[in-house]
């Protein structure tokens, strides 16, 4: 599959994947232990949920302007600024004075929004016929970063204190400068004029990503509650590794057909798989079978990774080439807005964790609505390669 790319394209995809993947690793290392860490500073579940999701709202705010700035000033410069901000936020989160200091640290951490600039950098350096495959590679690196993060985060908490995990995340952020420096940025980007307009169809596709990420953060927040019935936190890898590997293989298998003008079809498939996974996942407390739980987690990851593979390509097929950064920025802004609101709502509901059925119904309605929005934009007809 990598034979579809030139040596220089492979280098760019690999280096961007490493840069974004390291940042993702730093974000997700703290996920399994964040509620425990937050409880050191407050007894309020609402404030803990707000601290957890705070990075999502600043990512949502800054993705679009940073994406537009990357169209004008270059991807690498904006990604470097984002990494510096990420490091600063982690250092503040490591030693906050109180829960409000932790919230501020998380807000600063999220302000370093580099995903849209990174994806745009890859898309402008690969053929339009191989964008889905490049997105699949980036998506898999993000998936494995999450998997490694949720595994080593709890293990590290046994060896070092919780603050130390944020320090390590900051160090990983610093290391991510290495692959970024090695990227040779195309000179063509400097010829672009920043086109800040966001098309109506692109907005609607971006709102679909809001609901996907709303589901994602709720999935992760419920993960400890559901998983601890079977294994301790240190044993999460027993079902996370197989689930991510299976989903990653599926993502790679669909990438090539998706590039051959099946982007809309697999966008629909991702939403349908996510929709199926919701009741399977949330009915787990009533079934209490570990293999059933394996199935639920695998279904979620499969739908999620397929969506990560095809929706960015759908955006760049609908957008002008000189506005990739801005449009992908708005897309990722909606993703992280979904993270914020999902975390806050979960913070409200965690007071009574038995409210999983209303959450399940809310998620089902949101994904069904997403399917209708996809139909409104595409009529379930393929969006062919752009000629901009």
Image (spheres, helix red, strand yellow):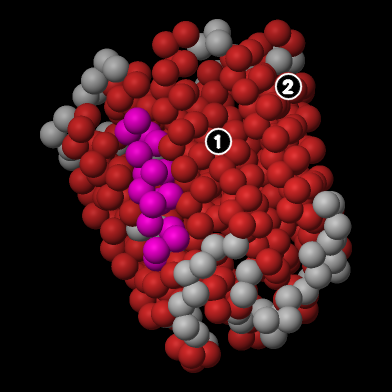
Comparing 271 with 89, the one in front is 271
Please give the name of the residue rendered at 77% of the width and 79% of the height, measured from the top-left corner: 3
Q: What is the magenta range?
A: 50-66
Question: Which is the main secondary structure of the residues drawn in magenta?
Answer: helix
Coordinates of residue 246 in the picture (x, y in percent): 76, 45
Residue 167 included in the magenta stretch of the image: no
Work out whether 169 lies above or below 368: below
Q: Quadrant of the N terminus?
A: bottom right
Please give the name of the residue rendered at 79% of the width and 47% of the height, measured from the top-left corner: 375
Work out whether 11 lies above or below 274: below
Q: SS for tag 2? A: helix
Please give the name of the residue rendered at 43% of the width and 37% of the height, measured from the top-left corner: 340
Please give the name of the residue rendered at 41% of the width and 22% of the height, measured from the top-left corner: 347
Q: Residues within 10 Å of mark 2 (few under 14, many from 20)?
A: some
Work out whether 23 lies above or below 196: above
Comparing 320 with 43, the one in front is 320
**Residue beneath disc 2:** 279
**Which image quarter: residue 364?**
top right
**Residue beneath disc 1:** 214
Camera-side mark, 1 or 2: 1
- Judge from the rendering whether residue 156 lies leftward or rightward of residue 238; answer left or right: left
Coordinates of residue 67 in the picture (x, y in percent): 45, 67
Coordinates of residue 14 in the picture (x, y in percent): 58, 71
Comparing 152 with 50, the one in front is 50
Is residue 231 at all visible to an observer of this figure? no
Q: How many numbered badges does the structure rendering display?
A: 2
Q: Quadrant of the C terminus?
A: bottom right
**Which image quarter: residue 113?**
bottom left
């Amino acid at each position: 599959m990598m034979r579809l790319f030139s040596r220089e394209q492979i280098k760019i995809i690999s280096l961007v994947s490493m840069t974004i993947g390291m940042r993702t690793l730093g974000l997700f290392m703290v996920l399994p232990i964040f509620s425990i860490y937050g409880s050191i500073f407050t007894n309020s579940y609402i404030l803990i949920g707000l601290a957890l999701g705070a990075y999502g709202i600043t990512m949502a705010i800054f993705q679009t302007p940073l994406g537009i700035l990357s169209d004008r000033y270059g991807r690498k410069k904006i990604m470097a600024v984002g990494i510096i901000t990420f490091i600063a936020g982690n250092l503040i989160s490591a030693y906050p004075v109180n829960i409000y200091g932790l919230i501020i640290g998380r807000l600063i951490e999220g302000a370093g929004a580099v995903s849209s600039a990174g994806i745009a950098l890859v898309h402008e350096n690969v053929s339009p016929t191989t964008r889905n495959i490049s997105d699949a590679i980036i998506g898999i690196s993000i998936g494995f970063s999450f998997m490694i993060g949720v595994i080593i985060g709890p293990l590290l908490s046994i060896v070092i204190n919780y603050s130390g995990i944020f320090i390590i995340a900051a160090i990983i952020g610093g290391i991510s400068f290495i692959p970024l420096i090695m990227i040779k940025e195309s000179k063509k980007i400097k010829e672009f004029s920043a086109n800040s307009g966001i098309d109506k169809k692109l907005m609607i596709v971006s709102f679909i990503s809001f609901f996907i990420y709303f589901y994602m953060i709720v999935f992760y927040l419920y993960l400890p509650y559901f998983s601890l019935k079977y294994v301790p936190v240190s044993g999460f890898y027993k079902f996370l590794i197989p689930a991510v590997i299976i989903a990653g293989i599926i993502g790679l298998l669909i990438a090539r057909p998706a590039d051959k003008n099946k982007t809309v079809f697999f966008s629909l498939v991702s939403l349908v798989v996510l929709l199926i996974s919701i009741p399977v996942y949330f009915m787990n407390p009533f079934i209490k079978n570990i293999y059933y739980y394996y199935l639920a987690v695998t279904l979620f990851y499969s739908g999620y990774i397929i969506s990560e593979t095809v929706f960015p390509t759908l955006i760049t097929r609908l957008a002008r080439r000189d506005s990739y950064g801005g449009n992908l920025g708005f897309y990722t802004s909606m993703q992280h807005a979904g993270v914020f609101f999902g975390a806050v709502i979960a913070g409200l509901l965690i007071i009574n964790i038995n409210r999983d059925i209303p959450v399940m119904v809310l998620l089902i309605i949101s994904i069904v609505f997403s399917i209708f929005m996809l139909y409104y934009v595409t009529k379930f007809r393929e969006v062919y390669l752009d000629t901009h």
